[in-house]
Image: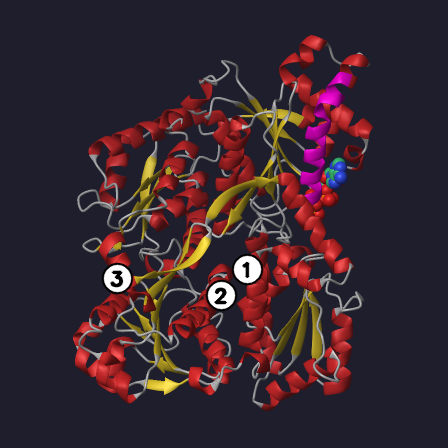
Amino acid sequence: ISSCDSTANPQTGNRKKIGVLTSGGDSPGMNAAVRAVVRMSIARGCDAFAIYEGYDGLVRGGDLIKQLYWDDVRGWLSEGGTLIGTARCAAFRSHEGRLQAAKHLVQSGIDALIVCGGDGSLTGADLFRSEWPSLITELVNNGSLTKDQVEPHKFLTIAGMVGSIDNDMSATDVTIGAYSSLHRICEAVDSIGATAFSHSRAFIVEVMGRHCGWLALTAGISTGADFVFIPERPPVGSAGKTWEDDMCDSIQRRRHRGKRETIIIVAEGAIDAELEPITPGYIKELLVNRLSIDTRVTTLGHTQRGGVPCAFDRILATLQGVEAVEAVLSSTPDTPSPMIGMNENKVTRKALVDAVNQTKAVAEAIGRKDFRRAMELRNTEFEALYDAFKIITLKDYSTMGLPQEKRMRIAIIHIGAPSGGINAATRAAARYCLNRGHTPLAIHNGIPGLVRHESIRELHWLDVDGWTLRGGSEIGTNRDLPEIDYGMTAWLFQKHRIDALLIIGGFEAFTALSQFESHRYAYPAFRIPMVCLPATISNNVPGTEYSLGSDTCLNALVNYCDVIRQSASASRRRVFVVEVQGGNCGYVATLGGLSVGAVAVYTPEEGINLQMLQRDIDHLREGFVSDKGMNRAGKLILRNERASATYTTEVIASIIRDEAKDRFDSRTAVPGHAQQGGIPSPMDRVRATRLAVKSIQFLEEKYDLEFGKDESSAAVIGIRGSNILFTPVSRLMTLETDKTKRRPKDAWWGQFKGLVDILSGRVCAEFTD
Ligand code: ATP
């Protein structure tokens, strides 16, 4: 038990009691959310209660409402499903059920309720809160509770977190569990793709999503599927044809061009424009009867719900759990119940009622056949994703072609180490270019490939087929910068009539862009629009909070650490010091630490000193003493590879071993290049597609400018807070870059380091405010 949990709530003098429940369908990450709520509540000087079996636990009370302590949630980060159970509770929909629920809450002394569930669960929570004053009056009037009992509970505070694999809640970009579910789907479809190719078959894969097509759409983007069918955007036929005709024609064309496999993803709730279901069986009949293609249907079913949460869901659930506790602590009787959401990279609080109403409005719009409105109501990126899917999947997507004078020859180059998603980005960029009438050119093997071997060629539609799920770099990459030969680079740009440039890579790519920009004065060939799409596992590119590949890396690290932790916990008394990549940037170590529940994280930004080691060894010792070998006590410390020249991973492990005096043991573990990941994660694939399309759109936008003068035409695309922004490289280099350490000056993720400390129990939240 952490030393934090004996602290009283300084605001009231009483210990606030916060209850948490999971409701509706289970989703991976719910346990991480409960863990964060429990630990943050305790760290904030409150008592934490779990309400088991969703609203059923509230209605039935008794043993189903139980206080949880610090150690009770140990190891929950990596568990799928929900360990406190969930249910669909008909009784809670009735007044009598909610009356019982109110009685049990007051009897348990719970002041605030955090609900993790879908829109139904959150609707129930808000209704419960609005009825609360009348429910407790009724309970006093009918003699179930006394006035004294209800006096401290005049108001109920509620916060909602959205746990749902469907990602069907408006007002948040993503819900807890959605990306883990997408991982399951992509694993399955990636495997199916191989067999489809081998036998030249078609596969129709049905995925979950009764009212929301997010899973089907993002799975389609991530796997390079041929078609997706979603409820929000029924298919329509082109002039004089049905959608069935169009689909069959298109499949036939693709097969004539040499494509062997066909993958079609269908959401459970897919419908046509008349609201009639489009079933996998119906599509199969079309393919068999009209095209004589050997076609199979695969229904993924509940495998999509299960399994270990991916790194993102652990982080999302943890951040949201922490935010939910903060929200209930700062709530007043007049504050609308908040729903904790996520917009791009920012945890947000929105009015729960508005979010629920907006979500319901989607279903209503579909019911009215107002599909345009349904798309708008989802979230801003949903429609953009849908458009991106179409334009990179359907060759000759006729409406997209640009007039001749706007068409460009756009070069794509990879600079720096490979990372997950760069091939998906290249594919998306190339196909977008082709549909717009541009000529995409691949520069092979970076700048040296260009200046030494003139390795540059046009990319065609089928060249990039299947690249979405490939790791490494299909066009080859290199770390060398334009400075190796500015003159030759410029001459070759001129020779190949390059009108615009997309650079994909990490800090080197960023530096290359800066070199091009700063040499425009001398080389007219560089006076073209240029954009850098950050892609590096280290996530150390200025101008963005996210780089392609960083999610793949975190997943590889999390999988590795889960295995290591198992070994550590089997022996009950072992600490693993895990050496993490990231260069001079502590992002991977910190976010990895948050995802695996590390006891400590060492970053290059903070360095390591003796006091830190002493502090952490004391903390470990306390933990092992209080645990008495009864819990799964495997502990991990994550040390960035460059956190200190003196305190190497080996040295730290040796110091811990010496200081532990046989009470516990330590080992080192170095995942090394395995952190670059094999197959890119779905998030990296989806974001690669979105960001690549946006990058080319940026180049189109800047094509008309007078480049010699306009610094904005050489920019880095980045996710910053809740926005996607293009920032001029000159500004980034001057104001936001630590050139010696090769990282942004402002480590935006530094705030999470404090959370690792709080959630590991070493630091109390109150003392860090
Ligand atoms: P999922 O997205 O997985 O379906 P959900 O939260 O939307 O999750 P629901 O079955 O709609 O799932 O709701 C879960 C529970 O929330 C219900 O069984 C019920 O107990 C409660 N609930 C839902 N809607 C209401 C409501 N309008 N009033 C009171 N309680 C409700």
Q: Main secondary structure of the magenta part?
A: helix
Neighbourhood count class around disc 2 (C-alpha, 10 Å): few under 14, some 14–19, many 20 upward: many
| Along the line of sight, the residue nearer the viewer: 29 or 514 | 514
Is 631 placed left or right of 390 in the picture?
left
Colouring scheme, one of rainbow, by chain, secondary structure, one colour: secondary structure
Residue span colored magenta: 117-137
Place residue 4 in its image quadrant: top left
Distance between mark 3 and mark 2 Cα atoms: 24 Å
Asked if the residue at tag 2 contacts the one at tag 1, i.e. Cβ–Cβ closer than 8 Å, the answer is yes
Taking 632 as reference, is 186 left or right? right
In this orientation, which residue lies closer to the viewer: 361 or 223? 361
Q: Hey, what amino acid is under mark 1? A: Glu
Q: Which mark is residue 690?
A: 2
Residue drawn at x 65%, y 83% as measured from the top left: 251
Lower position in the chain sequence, tag 3 or tag 2: 2
Q: Quadrant of ligand 1?
A: top right
Q: Position of residue 158 (x, y in %)?
A: 62, 31
Q: Earlier in the sequence, mark 1 or mark 3?
A: 1
Q: CA distance from mark 1 to mark 3?
A: 28 Å
Q: Does the stretch in magenta take in 610?
A: no
Q: Which mark is residue 730?
A: 3
Q: Amino acid at mark 2?
A: Arg
Mark 1, residue position: 381
Q: Residue at x 66, y 32 (%)?
A: 52
User: Which residue type carries mark 3?
Assistant: Ser
Element under label 2? Answer: helix
Disc marking residue 54: none
For the question of whether residue 371 can be seen, the reply is yes
Residue 30, image x and y in percent? 58, 42
Say what secondary structure mark 3 lies in: helix
